[in-house]
Amino acid sequence: MTDQQSPNRRYDMKKSINLWALPYPHKMTLKECFEVCKDAGFDGVELNYALDEDDLSPKASDKHIASIGEMARAMGLEISGVCSFLFWPYSLTHQEPKQRQKGLELAMGMIRAANLLGTENLLVVPGAVYVPWIKDVPPVPHDVCDRRAREAIRRLIPEAEKHNVFLNIENIFANGYLHSPQEINEFVDSFQSDRVHVHFDTGNISLYHFPEHWVPILGKRIRNVHVKEYSKNVNEFNLHAFRPLLDGTTNWPAVMEAFDRVGYHGYLTFEYFTPWPHWPEALVYQTSDALDRMLGGKA
């Protein structure tokens, strides 16, 4: 078991893990996942809003969603945020109007779910020029994508204000949109709303960029963080380039220093799809240990 909130930590940030790192729901229940994450020493967990899961989806009742947050807190965990793969098939900038409308409705549901869970953080993918892993979807011209993305976020802001939730815009490695920190800053600032911030993912830009260069430019806009390890030794442009923490080429000391300099004190959430059919919980413990070292609690 790892030390939680060790007084010896150099950096004042919290450890979190996305449940994609565990075989939920097909092999483990939500309660079992929480138990493993708590035992491994995590401060929080990030949940994923799906289309038809019983626990967190449009078909889940408000009472049930609220009970999930209550269960986590009773076990000593916080819900660090809400994430969703649904922003891809139901992109807010999709060429098909019905898909865009469905995406907007789902995003509204995510905002309400975040509030019920007791978190202020919702990761939002504002749009995509191209989604390489979804076949037969036509690309969207950049100017059209930008216009639709801004329209969608403007429509979501009142709902976010109503439910006290932050719309945290994520940088993505392969969607063809918002490819630089300057572009994201302009996008976020254009709404002049305290509801719109940045969800920074260290791995999503690591093919050509370096996260320690982005953090100082994004600065105080960063509201939540995904930490993903990346190996520049793998010459491919897909999810296989992402690695368990400390098994790549990311300069974590420089990244952590950058977060500290901009005054970031939120969650560092490990996002990874579990690769291990046997003892998948081992990844959770390994990740917690790696985060302890990154935070300066272990030599």
Image: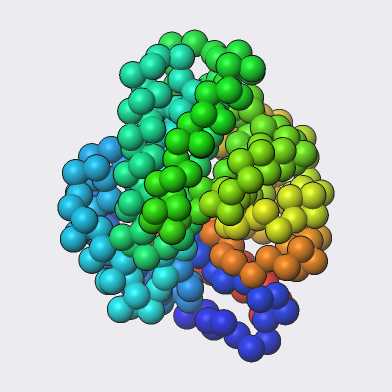
Image quadrant where residue 204 sits: top right
Image quarter where the C terminus lies is: bottom right
> Measuring 42% from the left and 62% from the top, which residue is drawn there?
119
Image quadrant where residue 244 sits: bottom right
x then y, percent, for residue 128: 55, 25
Outermost residue to the bottom: 7
**Is residue 6 something that shows in the picture?**
yes
- The answer to whether residue 172 is above or below residue 265 is above
Residue 53 located left or right of residue 235: left
> Measuring 71% from the left and 58% from the top, which residue is drawn there?
220
- The answer to whether residue 127 is above or below residue 249 is above
x then y, percent, for residue 108: 36, 42
x then y, percent, for residue 224: 58, 57
**Is residue 253 something that shows in the picture?**
no
Choose between 94 and 250: the one closer to the eye: 94
Residue 229 located left or right of residue 131: right
- The answer to whether residue 33 is above or below residue 8 is above
